[in-house]
Image (cartoon, rainbow, N blue to C red):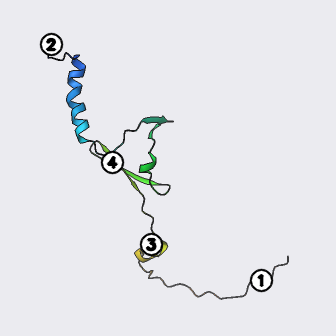
């Protein structure tokens, strides 16, 4: 059998998938390992892909997992989102505080 490559049946089926995978990888991708952390599956994020902050949003799109940083909202922006209250507040007597002995 010169000129032909004899492959085990399992490898012959795996080659098209391996070829497809290698064609879809990009230069900004990196191979990482998954591991167990208690009952959760976890992945170590390489330094060049680190996200800012302490929290992230994860969502699934088909067979892909997308991890995005949580966008911090400033206090001013948060207040701008709130509607003004339409409440009537009772009058409160503004009395001086009671003396305290130290």
The x, y position of residue 42, in whole percent, is 45, 40
The x, y position of residue 57, in whole percent, is 40, 53
**Is tag 1's residue or tag 3's residue first in the polypeptide sequence?**
3
User: Disc number at residue 98?
Assistant: 1
The x, y position of residue 92, in whole percent, is 62, 86
Q: Which residue is mark 2?
A: 2
User: Disc number at residue 10?
Assistant: none
Is 36 situated above or below 54? above
Q: Nearer the viewer, residue 53 or 2?
A: 2
Q: Which residue is mark 4?
A: 28
The x, y position of residue 53, in whole percent, is 49, 57
Single out the residue that lies furthest toward the top: 1
The secondary structure type at the circle numbered 3 is helix
The secondary structure type at the circle numbered 2 is loop
Q: Hey, which quadrant is residue 35 in on the image?
A: top left
Q: Are marks 4 and 1 in contact (CB under 8 Å)?
A: no
Q: Residue at x 46, y 42 (%)?
A: 44
**Is tag 4's residue or tag 1's residue first in the polypeptide sequence?**
4
Q: Residue at x 45, y 68 (%)?
A: 73
Single out the residue that lies furthest toward the right: 102
**Is tag 2's residue or tag 3's residue first in the polypeptide sequence?**
2
The secondary structure type at the circle numbered 4 is loop
Q: Residue at x 33, y 48 (%)?
A: 28
Q: Residue at x 73, y 87 (%)?
A: 96
| Marks 2 and 3, how far apart at CA | 72 Å
Q: Nearer the viewer, residue 67 or 49?
A: 49
Q: Nearer the viewer, mark 1 or mark 2?
A: 2
Q: Nearer the viewer, mark 1 or mark 3?
A: 3
Is 45 situated above or below 82? above
Q: Which residue is mark 3?
A: 78
| Marks 4 and 1, how far apart at CA | 66 Å
* Left or right of residue 61, residue 69 in this image: right
């Amino acid at each position: 059998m010169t000129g032909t490559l004899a492959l085990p049946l399992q490898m012959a089926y795996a080659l098209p998938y391996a070829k497809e995978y290698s064609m879809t990888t990009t230069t900004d991708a990196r191979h990482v390992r998954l591991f167990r952390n208690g009952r959760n599956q976890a992945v170590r994020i390489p330094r060049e892909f680190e996200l800012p902050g302490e929290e992230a949003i994860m969502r699934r799109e088909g067979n892909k997992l997308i991890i995005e940083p949580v966008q911090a909202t400033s206090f001013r922006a948060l207040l701008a989102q709130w509607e003004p209250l339409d409440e009537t507040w009772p009058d409160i007597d503004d009395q001086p505080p009671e003396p305290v002995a130290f």
